[in-house]
Amino acid sequence: MNFSRWKTGVQYPGAAGIFAIVLLNTHIAAAQHQHEMPSDSTKDEQHNNMQKEQHADYEMQSVPMSHAFSLNLPMNRNGSGTGWLPDASPMYGYMLHSRKWMYMIHGNIFVRYNNQDIDRKGMRGDSKVDAPNWFMAMGQRKAGDRGLFRFSAMFSLDPLFGGEGYPLLFQTGETYQGKPLVDRQHPHNLFSELSVAYTHSFSKDVDAFIYLGYPGEPALGPVAFMHRPSSMNNTDSPLGHHWQDATHITFGVTTIGIRYRIFKLDGSLFTGREPGEARYGFDKPSFGSYSYRLTANPAKTISLQVSKAFIESPEAVHPDEDIRRTTASVIHALPLKGENQSLNSTLVWGYNDSGEDHRENSLTLESNLQLDRVGIYGRYENIEKSAEELLLNQFDTHDIFRIQALTIGVNYALLRRWNTNFALGAQGSLYVADDELDPVYGNNPKSLEVYLRVSPFGFVGF
């Protein structure tokens, strides 16, 4: 999960001001010393206060201001599940402390109007007023001198807007009322993550960890799209979601991993079946699927990963079909001069293999340029989908079609209160598919969305 720079809202004096304050305090102290020598009781009280301050300092040192899976890495590397972001990634959220714990909270709400075929060229477009959203909370504390314990919870109120999700041309995956969802993005579950983890530090260079989630995210793919700074302003899931990072909600996952310097190797046993239509409940766990992933952060600005998985019976409408998934990704973070200014980009390749007649590639490239109050972003996708997935009964089941989508958007933070952005924005998409699909989708359909985004703009402590 991802948060931001530390901000307290306190204005600190410059060097000259500090020097003047020191001189003034010295003068006052000297004057007081000349007029009144402290009594023994006053000395005892001062000694007790000093001990309390030292004790408070010691307690604060035991609060881990670190990565969620390592006492030796920065918080900025936090992604989703056990995934890594670059160390130079911006962070957005709210921080709270107790004597032993550090808590972090963040989230995203888009209140929007979404029209997926503004020219009405095809038969599949739809429009809707809705509010895609998610909220996340995490806590961590030290366990002994070398241990780190953490928990994480993620929630979404997407189910309030209907089980069929929101319109999104050429999107596929999961079901509603027993039928495949096509040209719609499914809602995410009320309980999207409930997980715990323990990490042990053997040295500055070596950590080992175990992660348990119900639901949770296995070691597969890049950091999930809603946690990537490169897609934080985009209201839509990628069309390649079910080729790249859809396993971020898995009802039953166990992951173990080890880090050596810049490298991390982790592997998971997990439930392959995608979440059911009962979005408020918990699905039955099974551990017939497995994955493994190698991640490397060779510099502060970059994170690389490759991963493979065997996913047992992911789709309810095809219970006898398993998938072998391969992914690779590059995530780049470039801080710019000035506060809250950065350029973040992600390149993801995902490949699903479910048999000789059903192999499909997907490619996603996305970037977000944040210039304080202004966000400018884009996403390009190139993906292969079958006639069966798109419910195109007039074609052979295994016919494969190439779909391309280009999205460009911009937003502006009209209001900032309580370290929270209220940004007004708009984005448009152009879809380009094989000519055979024109009778169904029209020639190069377009979409338009306008929205109000509510999200943290900084990283503030309370």
Image: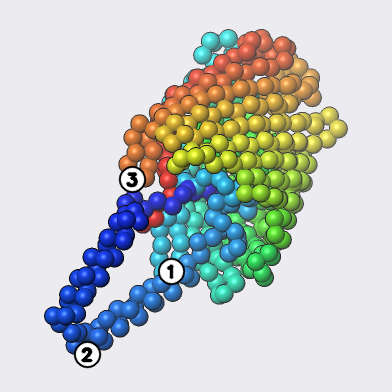
Judged from this view, the residue extending furthest toward the bottom is: 40
Residue under circle 3?
A: 418
Camera-nearest residue between 147 and 303: 303
Tell me if residue 254 comes above or below residue 330 in the rendering.
below
Give SS at disc 2.
helix
What color scheme is it? rainbow
- At label 3, counting other C-alpha atoms closer than 10 Å, the crowd grade (few under 14, some 14-19, many 20 or more) is few
- Residue type at tag 2: Asp
> Mark 1 touching mark 3, by CB under 8 A?
no
Circle 2 or circle 3, nearest the eye: 2
Residue under circle 2?
A: 40
Q: Is residue 365 visible?
A: yes
- Residue type at tag 1: Met
Circle 1 or circle 2, nearest the eye: 2
Residue under circle 1?
A: 60
> Mark 1 touching mark 2, by CB under 8 A?
no
* Mark 2 or mark 3, earlier in chain: 2
Horizontal and vertical percent position of residue 318: 72, 36
What residue appears at the point 71 percent right and 27 percent down from the top-left corner?
383
Left or right, 413 with reference to 66: left
Measured in 3D between alpha carbons, the distance from the residue under mark 1 to the one under mark 3, in whole angstroms, is 25 Å
